[in-house]
Image: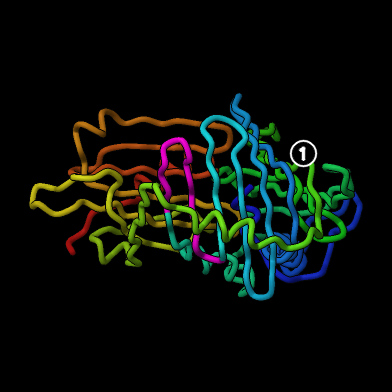
Amino acid sequence: MSVLLAVGSSASAQPKAATTEPAAAAPEVRAWLMRIHEAAGHRNFQGTFVVSGGGAVSSARIAHFRDGPNQYERSESLDGQARYVYRRNDLVHTVWPAARVALVEQRTLLASFPALLQAGDDRIVDFYNVRPDGVERVAGHEANVLLVKPRDALRYGYRLWADQASGLLLRADVLGERGDVLETSAFSEVTIGVKPQPETVLLPMKRLDGYRVLRPVLTATRLEAEGWVLRLPAPGFRQVSCVKRPLDGPGQFDKDGAEPQVLQTIYSDGLTYVSVFIEPFNVRRHTRPMQASVGATQTLMLQQGEWWVTVVGDVPPATLSGFAKGLERIQK
């Protein structure tokens, strides 16, 4: 769901209520997705959000406010360990009250992602067949439905429900190759058009006394500058971010006495992401290669020489394998 909320921006077109219409043209598809993204960033709303897939269910209370040029967001997990996320524009605080730990980050990494749609550089219609698929009610709101089918086996399909009045994405299903639902993200209840309450975000962000505050430093870089190249990314996927940061955990040093870092590069086809993580191999931490699946999210981990590679994305396992095989170490 977070991926799809990041797609799009300010277009006013809406899909019509129909179930037999042919696939839409690129400008129309882009307008629909841009409207969904615009609603996520500019509408005021709050509600309960539920994600289910792979036998697991999680829920959170979320709220989003737009106040002038600023965006505010808060999220409270309702399952498992208590966790709160507060965001003011690009500044994000993640707080675990029981552990008295707070993570403070600047999240500007995906600023170029919606620009793929805005510039018409996403080529979504080359890899997805998109058409209107009727009108249904979700969380008490009338929603236009979009059916998004992949044109190849390298990506999943989607069914999206967007509020007719605002464009806010109310539900998203990730669909497998046989049309089976791998994961569902949806509001169980939501109020759209609430009054902005920025103080409910700003005040908790200031209350970190007594917390261990982690402030990881992310450094923008290029894959090639770090001694790597991805020979053949999956068709349609383009790099949108590449950063490096210190590995989690204090007191970790490599054989030269330097603090080891993890390199993360993110690729997108305009609808979904694949993240590639590269870090020094550590026999105590990296015991064996593995492949895992939770709902729509696939994870592949393997050793490559003196390095440990992790590839994660809401894509079929074969797509992750292609990314891993195309990754090569080169001379810096």
Q: Quadrant of residue 224?
A: bottom left
Q: In this image, 323 relative to 28: left or right?
A: left
Is 275 inside the magenta-drawn segment?
no
Percent position of residue 245, x then y: 31, 56
Residue found farthest to the left: 256
Residue found farthest to the top: 55
Residue at image coords 52%, 52%: 273
- Foreground pick, 133 / 205: 205
Decide whether the magenta segment is chiefly helix, strand or loop: strand
Q: In this image, 120 relative to 139: left or right?
A: left
Residue at image coords 62%, 35%: 78
Q: Is residue 57 above or below residue 7?
A: above
Q: Is residue 16 visible?
A: yes
Q: Residues within 10 Å of mark 1 (few under 14, many from 20)?
A: some
Residue found farthest to the right: 17
Residue pointed to by mark 1: 188
- Foreground pick, 141 / 205: 205
Residue found farthest to the front: 209
Q: Is residue 290 above or below residue 130?
A: above
